[in-house]
Image (cartoon, grey):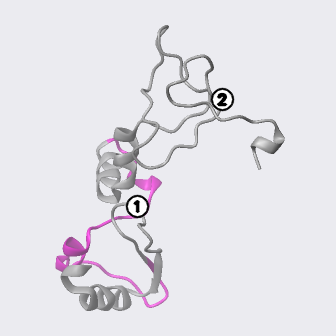
Amino acid sequence: MLEGRGWRVVKEDDDSAVPVFCWATRKAGDFPANASEDVPLPLIRPFPQDFTRRLDDKQELAMHLQVSGHEEIQPSTWCAEEFLLSDGLTGDDQELWFLKHSQGVKGNGVHVYAGLASIRGRLEELGTRG
């Protein structure tokens, strides 16, 4: 489709052209954050993989936001073990809770549960697999 609109593929080892757009897959296209005179960068590119790894790990992202004083950017986040051990959590049956794999989705969707008892019950069902 893109080639039909005039786009062309620039091979990784072709230094004759700088791609305008880079559509990288996991573990591919790991461009540095800054360009140098010797190594031009695509105008549109993914974040460096070290950076996206931090965004993918929901617990690590929550920790970075909290340390920087911006925890309000995302809802409170726990790993399953911490959540099940926390006794002080309260909430009503109408409150929504989201359950998601900690590292990207890997084919597992985000699941929504109404009420604290509902999410706690699902995590207990999953056991160590959760």
Q: Is residue 3 magenta?
A: no
Residue visible at 32% across and 49% down?
66
Q: Position of residue 51 (x, y in %)?
A: 38, 40
Q: Secondary structure at mark 1?
A: loop
Q: Position of residue 16 (x, y in %)?
A: 60, 16
Q: Secondary structure at mark 2?
A: loop
Q: How many residues crowd around disc 1 within 10 Å: few (fewer than 14), some, or many (20 or more)? A: some
Give the dominant element type of the magenta stretch: helix, strand or loop. loop
User: Of all residues shown, which one is farthest toward the top?
Assistant: 37
Viewer-side label of 1, 2: 2
Residue visible at 75% across and 36% down?
7
Q: Check disc 2 and give the amino acid type.
A: Val
Look at mark 2 in the image and give the residue it sits on.
20
Q: Quadrant of residue 48?
A: top left
Q: Check disc 1 and give the amino acid type.
A: Gly
Q: Which stretch is magenta?
A: 68-97
Left or right of 9 on screen, residue 28: left
Q: Which mark is residue 104?
A: 1
Point out the image quarter for the C terminus.
bottom left
- In-front residue for pair 44/56: 44
Ranked by sequence position, the earlier of labels 1 and 2 is 2
